[in-house]
Image (cartoon, grey):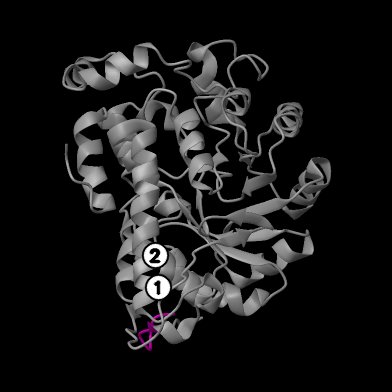
Amino acid sequence: MTVITCIDDLKQIYRRRTPRMFYDYCESGSWTEQTFRENTTDFDKLRLRQRVAVDMSGRSTASQMIGQDVAMPVALAPVGLTGMQHADGEIKAARAAEKFGVPFTLSTMSINSIEDVAAQTSAPFWFQLYTMKDQGFVSSLIQRAKDAKCSALVITLDLQILGQRHKDLKNGLSAPPKLTLSTMADLATKWRWGIEMLSAKRRHFGNIVGHAAGVSDAANLGAWTAEQFDPTLDWDKIARIKEEWGGKVILKGIMEPEDAEMALQVGADALVVSNHGGRQLDGALSSIRALPAILDAVGDRTEVHIDSGIRSGQDVLKALAMGAKGTYVGRAFVYGLGAMGQQGVTKALEVIHKELDVSMALCGRRRIDELGRDILKIPADFEGRWAE
C-alpha cells in the first residue's frame, strides 16, 4: 500500500489509473496555461512566519462558511465530469465531504444528477448553476435543487463563452469517451477504471440528458451544450435567479473590485475570487493575487471565498491569513477520487487538514479566527504595480 503524505502522491496514482482525456481535462488550462500555472506558483511566493513558545494545545480548524458549520473552511469545488474520473464520482465525493464535515458542490455538468447525489447522502449539498439560454431548463434545475434540499446555489459567472483548452480538443473529450484507436489503446491500460465504470449508475451528464428539451441521449448532447451557455448573462439576470432561488447564493468568478461591488448590489451571501482554475481567461491574475483588492473593496459586507491553485493545507492557511473566509479545492480532491475513489477524497481532505492544523500551530495560532496577515511575509510587489 502506497504511503500517502501529500496531494502530489495522490496525483501520481490518479495519473496512472485514469484515462488520459479525463486526466488532461482536470490538469490543464486555457490557451498558454499561464494563469493555470501562476494559480499555484503565486501561493509559493507567500511565506509563513514561525512563532515559538506559544501554547499550541486545544487547537481547532472548525469554522463556518455562509453560516454552515464546517470542520475546516474548505469546500469541494464544483467540477464537471467528476463521474468520469471515477465511477459514480460525484456520489463518492459528496459522501466523503459529508463524513468529513465540509461542503460539497455539485456541478451542473456532473455525471451523477442532483437526484442521484441527494438519494445517496443525508447532509444538504450546494448546487452550482451555469446559466443557459433555455430559461425553462434553468428554472427546472433551480426547482430540482430546491427539491433536493440543496442549502446554497453557486452561480458561476465566468463561463458565458467557453475558453479553449487545447488538450480537450486534441483528446476528443466526451462523456462517455468515443472509442477511437487512440482512446481504446489508452483505455486498455486503465482496466481498473473500465471495470468500475461498467457498474456506474451513469456515464453521461445526468442533470441534462432526459431533462433538457431535445436531449434524450448522449448523441445529441454535444450540440446542445455547445449552443446553450448564455452570452447575455448580466447582473439583472443574476438578480432574477437569486430571487427565484430564494435561498443563499454564492457568486463565483469575481476577479475585479467593480464586479465585487455589483455582487454586493444583487445581495450575494458570499463571492468566490476565482479564475475558473485558469481554464477561462488565460493571462488573468492568479486568484491569490486578485484576493487583496477584492477584500479591500468588500470589507466585511459579505463573505469572500477563494478557489484556483489550492493544493495543500498551507495554501488554505495562506488564503485564510490573507482574509478569505472560505476556500475551495477542485483538482486536489479529483486527484484523490481518481486514485482511490471515496477513500481517496477522504485522504485528500485528511492531508489538507493535517497540513493546515500543523502549519497553523507552528505559526502560533490555535483557531481559524486568529489568522491574519501578521503570520505572513508578503512580497512588496505581490499585488503588482500595473499601468492603467
Residue 216 spot, x, y in % from top left: 59, 10
Q: What residue is shown at x 44% (from left), y 80% (from top)? A: 383
Q: Is residue 311 left or right of residue 119?
A: left
**Which segment did they paint magenta?**
376-383
Please say if 349 is above or below 226.
Answer: below
Q: What residue is shown at x 25% (from left), y 37% (from top)? A: 14
Looking at the image, do the residues carrying marks 1 and 2 touch, with CB atoms under 8 Å apart? yes
Q: Is residue 26 visible?
A: no
Which residue position holds label 2? Answer: 356
Q: What residue is shown at x 60% (from left), y 24% (from top)? A: 207
Q: Is residue 268 left or right of residue 40?
A: right
Residue 284 spot, x, y in % from top left: 44, 63
Q: Is residue 78 left or right of residue 247?
A: left
Residue 384 spot, x, y in % from top left: 42, 81
Please say if 289 is above or below 219.
Answer: below
Residue 352 part of the magenta-drawn span? no
| Residue 309 occupies quadrant | bottom left
| Residue 252 occupies quadrant | bottom right
Q: Is residue 85 visible?
A: yes
Residue 379 part of the magenta-drawn span? yes
Which residue position holds label 1? Answer: 360
Give the amino acid at mark 1.
Answer: Met
Q: Is residue 219 left or right of residue 269?
A: left
Q: Residues within 10 Å of mark 1 (few under 14, many from 20)?
A: many
Number of residue marks: 2
Q: Residues within 10 Å of mark 2 (few under 14, many from 20)?
A: many
Mostly what secondary structure, the magenta segment? loop
Which image quarter holds the N terminus?
Answer: top left
Give the amino acid at mark 2.
Answer: Leu
Q: Give whichever of 136, 346 is nearer the camera.
A: 346
User: Which secondary structure lies at badge 1?
Assistant: helix
Q: What is the spatial separation of the Cα atoms under label 1 and label 2, in whole angstroms?
A: 6 Å
